[in-house]
């Protein structure tokens, strides 16, 4: 019975040793190189290659999250449309009605968001 699990045990041991060795080498070489090249430019904060002009913990407008949620909803809608389109021959009229109900609910939600002004960035 132990012979069945011996290859797994050897693999896990070697993987752990290799991971530890790579972490130790990375730490060693990282400390070695940072001692030589710690200048003001390397330690300065940056954002996309230039100095930060604002606090990085600034609050986002709620409309950003609403647009993100809308994107996720319509992205998932596409994910549901593909299998429906593939199996349309088998589901026939019933599948068409169910998908029409599904899409109408999503369109009603989209119109609601549009009327609420969630997509406007004034």
Image (cartoon, rainbow, N blue to C red):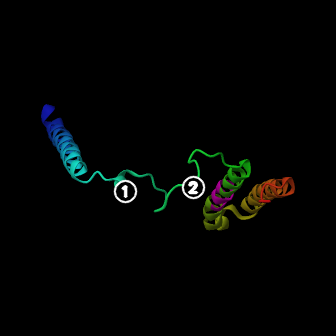
Pointer 1: residues within 10 angstroms few (<14), some, or many (20+)? Answer: few
- Above or below, 23 against 92 in this view is above
**Prevailing secondary structure of the magenta residues:** helix
- Look at the image and give the residue range highlighted in magenta: 72-78
What is the residue that sits farthest to the right in this orientation? 115
Front residue of 55/106: it is 55
Residue 121 appears in which quarter of the rendering? Answer: bottom right
Circle 2 residue? 53
Q: Position of residue 56 (x, y in %)?
A: 56, 48
Q: Residue at x 70, y 55 (%)?
A: 67
Q: Nearer the viewer, residue 122 or 35?
A: 35
- Does the CB distance between marks 1 and 2 fall below 8 Å? no
**Residue toward you, 108 or 113:** 113
Mark 1 vs mark 2, CA separation in Å? 17 Å
Q: Of residues 6 and 91, which is closer to you in this image?
A: 6
Q: Is residue 85 left or right of residue 39?
A: right
Q: Of label 1 and label 2, which has the lower sequence position?
A: 1
Q: Label 1 belongs to which residue?
A: 41
Q: How crowded is mark 2: few (under 14 residues within 10 Å), some or many (20 or more)?
A: few
Q: In this view, does 33 lie to the left or right of 60?
A: left
Number of marks in the image? 2
Q: In which quarter of the image is the C terminus?
A: bottom right
Residue 81, percent across and down? Answer: 66, 62
Disc 1 element:
helix
């Amino acid at each position: 019975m132990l012979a069945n699990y011996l290859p797994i045990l050897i693999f896990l041991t070697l993987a752990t040793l290799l991971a530890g060795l790579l972490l130790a080498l990375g730490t060693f070489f990282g400390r070695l190189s940072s001692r030589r090249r710690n200048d003001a430019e390397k330690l300065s904060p940056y954002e996309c290659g230039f100095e930060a002009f604002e606090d990085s913990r600034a609050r986002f407008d709620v409309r950003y999250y609403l647009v993100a949620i809308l994107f996720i909803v319509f992205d998932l809608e596409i994910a549901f449309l593909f299998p429906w389109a593939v199996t349309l021959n088998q589901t026939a009229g019933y599948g068409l009605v169910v998908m029409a109900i599904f899409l109408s609910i999503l369109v009603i939600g989209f119109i609601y968001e549009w009327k609420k002004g969630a997509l406007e960035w004034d």
